[in-house]
Amino acid sequence: MALTRFWFILLLLFCISSQAAVQTLQQEELPNYAFAPFIGSGIYATRDRTVTVFNIPLSYDMRTIVEDGWGLEVTTPVTIGLFNFDFRDLEIPNLQEQLGTLSFVPGLHFHLPVSKQWILTPLVDLGVGKASSGSDFAWIYSIGLESRYNFDWRSYDLLLGNRFRYTGYQLHESDIQDDYYSFETGLDVLLPPHLNHFGWKARFNAYAMNQLYFGDLDFVNPLGQSHEVDVLWEVGFTVDLSTNTDTGIFELPRIGLGYRFGDGLGLIRLVFGRMF
């Protein structure tokens, strides 16, 4: 039992940022939660209970730019929604009773170097999602293009990232569907000095992001007030521990804290993983 609990808690540690926002999830529109693999984990509200959604990001590099001249990353994120999950309770949830939603949206990300500093990444994701209530499931899809440009400024290493993405879902047995477009811009700054304690190397980063959403993307706060989101900003910092592992399969995540705001929203986020 102790070992099982350890692995469950370990999986939670890899979840991308739990947001303090709440989105509407209704029986007939399964899927605002279908966007969680791309917008982020969070707490979704139904008519009589809540669904806490965890996005577990997993990936594997089939090819690398260093060895092959271009890269191919296979992403296999799993998104799990639990009914009435309490963060203060570290007991293992009863999946038979609490499992509310489950989605698996694998993707192919092609890393194509334009120059030593600039990498373009076409990406495509396709998977399925389902709520425990009801027999229908949703096809979830996404296609986009990501840009990563590394450069130096004085003694700082900087990364300028951009991502354009089209995301949508379609219920399998009905005409219900939804989609949106997004454009993200982010600047990531590696802060000196690098620290080394007890053999562990730590790199500290500060970042700022802008997110533009095109489409009727609504967030509902815990008071039940709806906000149509068009523009969001985010600032924060992370600690990068990935240089301590070099297995090709598993890397320690970047861990940090961010503040997302805009269009009447203000969210404090616990961040796991990189922005771009």
Image (cartoon, helix red, strand yellow):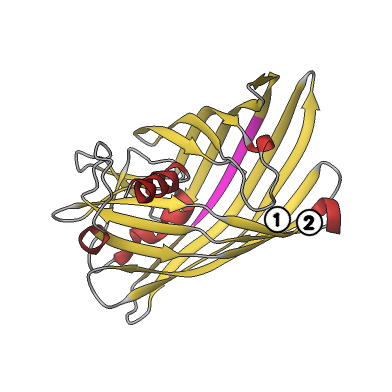
The label shown at residue 236 is none
SS assignment at label 1? strand
Labels 1 and 2 touching (C-beta < 8 A): yes
Label 1 to label 2: alpha-carbon separation:
6 Å
Q: Which residue is mark 1?
A: 121
Q: Residues within 10 Å of mark 2 (few under 14, many from 20)?
A: some
Residue, far left = 48
Q: Which residues are magenta?
A: 181-188
Answer yes or no: is residue 69 visible.
no
Q: Is residue 99 above or below residue 227?
A: below
Q: Amino acid at mark 2?
A: Leu
Identified at 49% across, 65% down, the residue is 105
Q: Amino acid at mark 1?
A: Thr
Quadrant of res 135: bottom left
In this picture, residue 271 sits left or right of residue 109:
left
Image location of residue 198, percent across then percent down = 63, 22
**Any magenta on residue 227?**
no
**Any magenta on residue 184?**
yes
Image location of residue 47, percent across then percent down = 15, 56
The C terminus lies in which quarter of the figure? Answer: top right
Q: Which residue is mark 2?
A: 112
